[in-house]
Amino acid sequence: PRITEHPTDMTVARNDPVTLKCSADGSPAPTIEWYRDGELIVSSNGQQQQHSKSGGGGGNSHRVMLPGGDLFFFRVVHGRKESDAGLYWCLARNPQGSSRSRNATLTVACKCNVESHF
């Protein structure tokens, strides 16, 4: 398989939606797997991990893989127990082998009140 569209670095405000792009071709058509910080989070074959570094998670996921392989976040999470920020990549896999995309960093921007002291 061959990655035809790589994900790119993104900065998004907390609770906003975002899509990380990934497309691949090959024969037979490859499955797409998404990884964050080295751990599988979702696969186009239906496998989905409820991933959180702190061990939280559970319930319905706030992210889904779209039919073409893109990873869509309904709302980006950033808090003490769970955060979507991290290093992402996709992997296209079929019986002929696998191909990994370039890395993409997802940064979650805080809409914080910052006091200025002049």
Image (cartoon, rainbow, N blue to C red):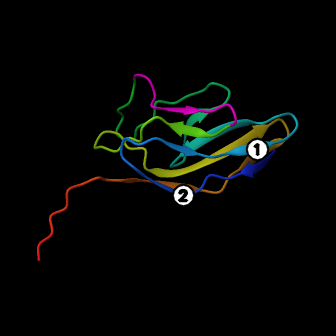
- Above or below, 9 relative to 76: below
Q: Is residue 44 magenta?
A: no
**Which element type, helix, strand or loop, lies under badge 2?**
loop
Outermost residue, right side: 27
Task: Report which residue position mark 1 lands on.
Answer: 24
Q: Give the main secondary structure of the magenta stretch.
A: loop
Q: Is residue 71 left or right of residue 79?
A: right
Which comes sooner in the sequence, label 2 or label 1? 2
Q: Position of residue 87 (x, y in %)?
A: 51, 53
Outermost residue, left side: 118
CA neighbours of label 2 inside 10 A, class few (<14), some (14 to 19), many (20+): few
Q: Amino acid at mark 1?
A: Ala
Task: Report which residue position mark 2 lands on.
Answer: 9
The segment highlighted magenta reads 59-68
What residue is rendered at 37% in x and 41% in y?
Answer: 15
**Which element type, helix, strand or loop, lies under badge 1?**
strand
Q: Amino acid at mark 2?
A: Asp
Q: How many numbered discs sit on the rendered protein?
A: 2
Q: Position of residue 107 (x, y in %)?
A: 43, 55
Q: Is residue 113 left or right of residue 36?
A: left
Q: Which quarter of the figure is the N terminus placed in?
A: top right
Q: Position of residue 63 (x, y in %)?
A: 50, 33
Q: Is residue 62 magenta?
A: yes
CA neighbours of label 1 inside 10 A, class few (<14), some (14 to 19), many (20+): many
Q: Position of residue 4 (x, y in %)?
A: 76, 50
Image quadrant assignment for residue 82: top left
What residue is rendered at 66% in x and 30% in y?
Answer: 44
